[in-house]
Amino acid sequence: MSQYTFVGPITQLLPMVGLPLKGAISDGELPVWESCGILLEGNRIFEIGDYRDLAKKAKDLKAKIVLLESPCVVLPGWIDAHTHICFEGSRARDYADRNSGATYQEIAQRGGGIWDTVTQTRKADQDTLAQGVVRRANTHLLNGVTTIEVKSGYGLDVQEELKMLRAIREADSRTPADLIPTCLAAHIPPRDFPGGASAYLDVLEQELLPVLLRENLSNRIDAFIEKGAFDPKTILPYLKKAKEMGFQLTLHADQFSTGGSEIAVACEALSADHLEASTEKEIQLLAGSSVIAMALPGASLGLGCAFAPARKLLDAGGAVAIASDHNPGSAPMGDLLTQASILGAFEKLSNAEILAGITFRAAAALDKQDRGVLQKGFLGDFIIFSTTHYNEILYHQGSLKPESVWKNGKQVFPINNQ
């Protein structure tokens, strides 16, 4: 059986190559290839080129032929670089209370919010959590998301955080999507911990982080820098220690108040996520750094607050990625394409900037250098839309779903039983 697969003919293919990591991108800069095909070797892209020329090569290689019979547009698989899809329970009551006028902080103070999910997640066993992750990851996959970052953070105890990260690892073996685990044990100080925030972080540093390395559960550390969570001064020693131990950093920053993005830049984090409260000071700071600015429009929609200043960040020269923040509290929708489309409409982002934000710029936020674009040697992660022009995809704001999804060189949706 040949290890080669040939897919085509493709009406339009957007490889997302040759575009800048930072700054604004006009639609005129977006490369669009027409009448082409993709030749795969195993799980990697072997060649992309003119359909007729590549079809001849595929025949010589005795490749499996996948004929696309109707007009279609192909893009790299979406990358959702910030989710919390490992959890148990619902926070529908929180949503109703917010729409009735209660603030995020007020809901948390009366027993809702993150601690509500912590309580419900602690009651679930590892297999139950893994099943939930697989179910949600597969929904993302059907919507074209082939790589999904998944955070812990609803355990807030060494053993409970380990349970979550083991569940994420288990789920990764049970879904075609790639799950990238991130340890968010520094989500909020646990209410049932006998010491203060600093003492809790000391326990994580001494008892949790070494196990993550030993069991290879995660090489990424996150923290929520915010009032009611961890302030910049308290969290900084923990982040520095994590970095000394070899962990990569990503931070919840500037969601309701500023201070987090400054820590992200100081610690050379891969990304600073949220940024709804960022001012001109933070915009310039992020734009002048290597930190990816991660906009999370799902949280803005769920909380009814302003979007991250994506337009200003791009115009200042920053790198902007877009993620769903899929979580049971502030961002329950979880539809990355819909959220990115809406963010684009409100922030006046070009189609090129939106697509960059959910492909190669999102890959950079995860330090994944083998995906996010379509070119030789990269993973065979791509999605096919039944349409004649790529503009239709964002125009329909998420209602135009992929006709098929390919992950690691194999069609995973619809299921190919041949």
Image (cartoon, rainbow, N blue to C red):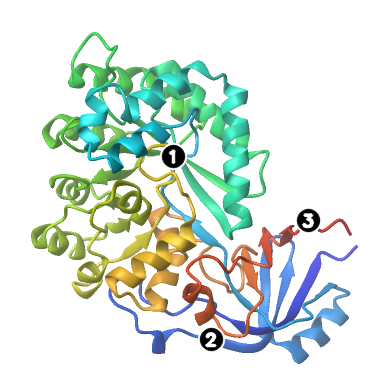
Residue at 45% in and 71% down: 355
Circle 2 sits on which residue?
Answer: 32
The residue tagged 1 is 84
Confirm whether residue 246 shows in the render: no
- How far apart are the alpha carbons under marks 1 and 3? 27 Å
Q: Quadrant of residue 385?
A: bottom right
Label 3, on which residue?
A: 415
Please rate how many residues cluster around mark 1, counting C-alpha atoms within 10 Å: few if below 14, some from 14 to 19, many from 20.
many
Give the class, few, some or many, for how many residues have Cα within 10 Å of label 2's Cα (few <14, many ≥20).
some
- Total label count? 3
Q: Amino acid at mark 1?
A: His
Query: How far from the left and from the top, in percent, is residue 277?
Result: 17, 52
How many angstroms separate mark 3 from mark 2 (CA)?
Answer: 28 Å
CB within 8 Å, label 3 to label 2: no
The disc, 3 or 2, on the residue closer to the chain's N-terminal end is 2
Q: Is residue 413 left or right of residue 369?
A: right
**Element class at badge 3:** loop
The outermost residue toward the front is 100
Nearer to me, 385 or 130: 385
